[in-house]
Amino acid sequence: MRQSGTVYNASILSPPHLLLVSPMVYILTAVAIIAIIGIALLIDFFDKNDIRSKEEKIRYQYTRKRFFLTRAEHEYYDAIVAAVGAQYHVFAQVHLSSILDNKVAGQNWQAAHSQVNRKSVDFLLCDKAYISPLLAIELDDKSHERLDRRERDETVERILRDTGLPLLRIKNRHAPNIVELTQKIREHLPDTGTTI
């Protein structure tokens, strides 16, 4: 073919063997990329599992605490038991997750659990018939004046208020007075028909 002095050869412009190879090259390249990514993911997976297995094999050491409660907590525990122990069970260091149910319809249960996880109240009064929580008691020492503790206390107060569980805060400034303590507990306990 000759036009304007230029010769065009149709077989050079689109040889049939290039049309067959081109799609195959793309397919092989895609397969190679997928294989490389797959191998990289497998290596990452096995590296992470190797780290986890090493962590799981670490055997941490612990010692038993000599006392379950601090001295002040122990004094107030004894005073609370003396004040209302005949009518109520008194528990110490109770985690909120033990007395509150985070599985409420319409909310993220794990996020709700994280709000109460690792938070506790110093004391909990429960009825003797069913061991139902009736009153939470917090013993406030000087640490409760710190900003992080105040924020934690506000969160605990809100959560307990929302659930209808009363909270009694006691300032730990002096030795407990059983008569005053009995009066404060009586004022904060829901009316259950039981007299203290």
Image (cartoon, rainbow, N blue to C red):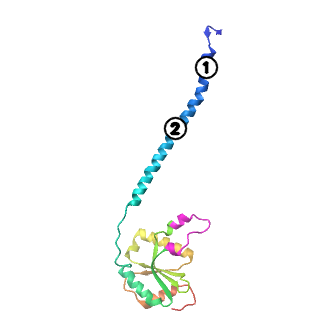
**Which residue is rendered at x = 37% and y = 61% of the image?**
58
Q: Is 101 colored magenta in this rendering? A: yes
Check disc 1 and report its element: helix, strand or loop.
loop
Q: Earlier in the sequence, mark 2 or mark 1?
A: 1
Q: Which residue corresponds to mark 2? A: 33
Amino acid under label 2? Answer: Ile
Q: Is 143 colored magenta in this rendering? A: no
**Which residue is rendered at x = 40% and y = 58% of the image?**
55
Q: Is residue 164 above or below residue 106?
A: below
Q: Is residue 175 above or below residue 45?
A: below
**Which residue is rendered at x = 61% and y = 10% of the image?**
7
- Picture coordinates of residue 92, whole percent (x, y): 44, 80
**Image quadrant of residue 24?**
top right
Q: How many marks?
A: 2
- Picture coordinates of residue 180, whole percent (x, y): 44, 89
Amino acid under label 1? Answer: Pro
Check disc 2 and report its element: helix, strand or loop.
helix
Q: Which residue corresponds to mark 1? A: 15
**Image quadrant of residue 63?**
bottom left
Residue range highlighted in magenta:
96-113
* Nearer-the-camera pick, 189 or 68: 68
**Which residue is rendered at x = 63% and y = 16% of the image?**
10
Q: Is residue 44 above or below residue 55?
A: above
- Picture coordinates of residue 98, whole percent (x, y): 51, 74
* Nearer-the-camera pick, 112 or 142: 112
